[in-house]
Amino acid sequence: MCYRRPAAGGPRVSLSVDDRLEILDLAARYNHAVDSGDHEGAAALFTEDGAIEATATGTIAGPAAIADYIGSRPDGWQRRRHFNNNAIIEGVPGDEDAATLAMYIMVLSRRETVLPRLLGRYEDELRRVDGEWRFRRRRIIADADAASGRRAEG
Amino acid sequence: MPLSCDDRLDILEVAARYCRALDRGDPEGLEAVFTEDAVWESSARGQRRGRAAIVDEFRARAAQAHTRKHWTSNPVIEGDGDHASLTLDLLVLHLDDGDVRPGTSGVYEDRLRRDEAGWRIAYRKITVDGQRAGFRGVPAQPAGKDATR
């Protein structure tokens, strides 16, 4: 663990550089998996008790349900591309195997033209299981639906 | 002493916290990313000197909260010891009536300083694309009249 001075705004728990980069990698793996239609691969990034929460769909709990959810998108995930930005990673006091990740999310729809479909943010709770960071809870908060009928989709 | 990996990740996170605070309309969050003597300078809005003046500038834009998302890319960090520079490309996404569209683009050129509070922005210059040539700083505009940020 590297020592990190707490920034203004309250004490923070330091995470190592390895942890921080592994967590960014986890977020990227999710995007790569869902954008390539690998729902099982995306679901495997969650803990056994992991869940996705979105306004439109409520809570989807457990890897099997998450894989079903990701695989069931009506027009197919392979026509989407997920982008993240402005990641903020924080440790959890008293629990070195827990962390939070807050990030912007933009989903582009890839059809004849590229259109922003969803803009919002993820608020994730992460847990380290057998040395690997996993999503325990992924909350998707849409800023606004990009057009009528469009819903918050992770 | 060269910047560590921790320093680099911390600096990227400061930039992320700026965007988050700005887009949420969170003055305390903005306060936390600037040094007290910070200078903020925009090709669209002129210069603000001191953290209080910078936060006031953004307080005046509270009505824009949740209608903009500041998206950044291509960070280049250089520095030594307790001083660093950060260059960052910027794209502002606008949410208007349920539609998402790219708004302003530009470049952030920052200088950051580390003290006991961690890394914070001491100087941030924002050059909006199209306003680069001949930029000498323009006077502030009244809140709500500006469509660039």
Image (tube, rainbow, N blue to C red):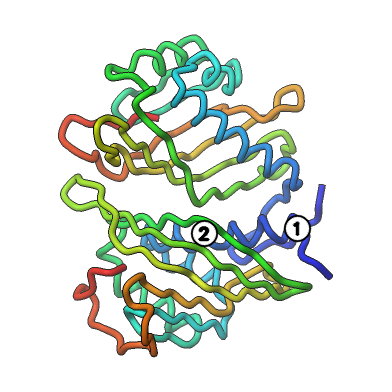
Quick one: B52 or B12, which is closer to the camera? Answer: B12
Q: What residue is shown with label 2?
A: B17
Can you say which quadrant of the picture contains the C terminus of chain A? top left
Mark 1 Cα within 10 Å, few/some/many (few <14, many 20+)?
some
Q: Which mark is residue A4?
A: 1
Instruction: Please tell me whether mark 1 sits on a helix, a strand or a loop.
Output: loop
Decide: is A63 above or below B8. Answer: above
- Amino acid at circle 1: Arg
> Residue B44's image quarter?
bottom left
In the image, B99 versus B105, the foreground residue is B105
Query: B56 or B128, which lies in front?
Result: B128
Which amino acid type is shown beneath numbered disc 2? Arg
**1 and 2 marks on the same chain:** no
**Image coords of residue A57 (percent x, y):** 32, 23
Q: Chain of mark 1?
A: A
Report in which chain the residue with disc 2 lies: B
Q: Quadrant of residue B70?
A: bottom left
Q: Please indicate whether residue B35 sits to the left or right of residue A83 in the image.
A: right
Q: Residue A34's spot in the image, x, y percent?
A: 46, 24
What residue do we see at 39% from left, 79% from top? B42
Q: CA distance from mark 1 to mark 2?
A: 17 Å
In the rendered structure, the answer to whether residue B5 lies left or right of residue A137 reads right
The residue shown at (71%, 71%) is: B79
Q: Position of residue A5 (x, y in %)?
A: 74, 62
